[in-house]
């Protein structure tokens, strides 16, 4: 017992605890009120989505990372990869999603002339044609997942991509610009099983100022 007590006072152990505490992931605050996206996304959905679902991914990621640090073998660390991928993806995807939204009265749904609009017109024919293709592609996801507008650095073009579950749409050549959550928790309380209505409505609160096309 004495040796255990002494170990807790060792500088290295104290530093380890401090570093672990500093590394804990936390739920980001929303840049708007829960009712700010109404009538397109209800306050009830936003509260559940942010406080319950996103928080669950944060908790799961912290738990998985803690278990990974303590895992005594390579086998056990490999077994934790699925939890790290799922919860880490959920945290990252949702953190981007909240920024992709803004109230209609504060510019939501307004796409001004600029690089992004020009690129959408170049690659899809028009902004409306892009939205139609994006909605159709995203609505076709079987089960849960995300719809993405991204920039492919290899082809130098915008592209519409879907990812299952909480998989990330990001790698060296692909940069996400807009992500739309198509998990049922994002819309079911308001739109039931009609994904198309949810996808049509969400464009009214998309934050195109945040969705910039990098130079």
Image: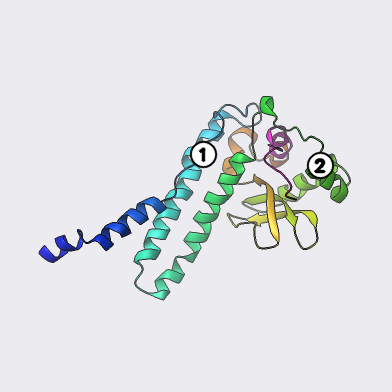
Disc 2 from disc 1: Cα separation: 30 Å
| Mark before the other along the chain sequence, 2 or 1 | 1
Q: Is residue 150 left or right of residue 167?
A: right
Q: Are marks 2 and 1 in contact (CB under 8 Å)?
A: no
In-front residue for pair 211/97:
211
Direction top: furthest residue: 105
Residue 100: x and y, percent? Answer: 64, 40
The spot of residue 104 in percent (x, y) is 68, 27
Check disc 2: other Cα within 10 Å, few if <14, some if 14-19, many if 20+.
Answer: some
On whether residue 211 falls in the magenta region, the answer is: yes
Secondary structure, mark 2, is helix
Query: Residue, x 20% and y 59% (percent of image)?
Result: 8
Q: Is residue 10 above or below residue 198?
A: below
In this view, the residue in front, 134 or 5, is 5
Instruction: Tell me, yes or no, if residue 131 can be seen here.
Output: no
State which region is magenta: 198-213
Instruction: Answer few, some or many: residues within 10 Å of disc 1's Cα (few below 14, many 20 plus, some between 14 and 19).
Output: many
Q: Kindly identify the residue that appears in the image at 39 percent across and 51 percent down.
A: 22
Q: Residue 119 lies in magenta, yes or no? A: no
Please state if 188 lies on the left or on the right of 110 as rendered.
left
Residue pointed to by mark 1:
50
**Of the pair 177 and 93, the residue shown nearer to us:** 177
Q: Is residue 125 visible?
A: yes
Residue sitting at 42 percent across and 69 percent down? Answer: 77
Tell me where residue 151 sits by quadrant.
bottom right
Q: Name the residue located 72 percent from the left edge and 36 percent from the top edge.
A: 203
Q: Quadrant of residue 185?
A: top right
For disc 2, the marked residue is 117
Q: Secondary structure at mark 1?
A: helix
How many tags in the picture? 2
Residue 58, compared with residue 37, is above or below; it is below
């Amino acid at each position: 017992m004495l040796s255990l007590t002494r170990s807790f006072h060792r500088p290295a152990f104290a530093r380890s605890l401090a570093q672990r505490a500093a590394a804990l992931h936390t739920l980001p605050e929303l840049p708007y009120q829960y009712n700010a996206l109404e009538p397109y996304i209800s306050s009830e959905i936003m509260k559940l989505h942010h406080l319950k679902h996103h928080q669950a991914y944060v908790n799961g990621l912290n738990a998985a990372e803690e278990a990974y640090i303590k895992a005594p073998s390579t086998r056990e660390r490999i077994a934790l990869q699925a939890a790290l991928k799922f919860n880490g993806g959920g945290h990252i995807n949702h953190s981007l999603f909240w920024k992709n939204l803004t109230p209609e009265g504060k510019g939501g749904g307004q796409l001004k002339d600029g690089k992004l609009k020009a690129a959408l017109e170049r690659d899809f024919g028009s902004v409306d044609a892009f939205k139609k293709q994006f909605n159709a592609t995203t609505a076709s996801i079987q089960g849960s997942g995300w719809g993405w507008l991204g920039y492919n650095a290899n082809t130098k073009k915008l592209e519409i991509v879907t990812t299952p579950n909480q998989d990330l749409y990001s790698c060296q050549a692909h940069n996400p610009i807009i992500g739309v959550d198509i998990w049922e928790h994002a819309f079911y309380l308001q739109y039931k099983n009609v994904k198309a209505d949810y996808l049509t409505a969400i464009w009214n609160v998309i934050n195109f100022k945040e969705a910039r096309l990098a130079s």
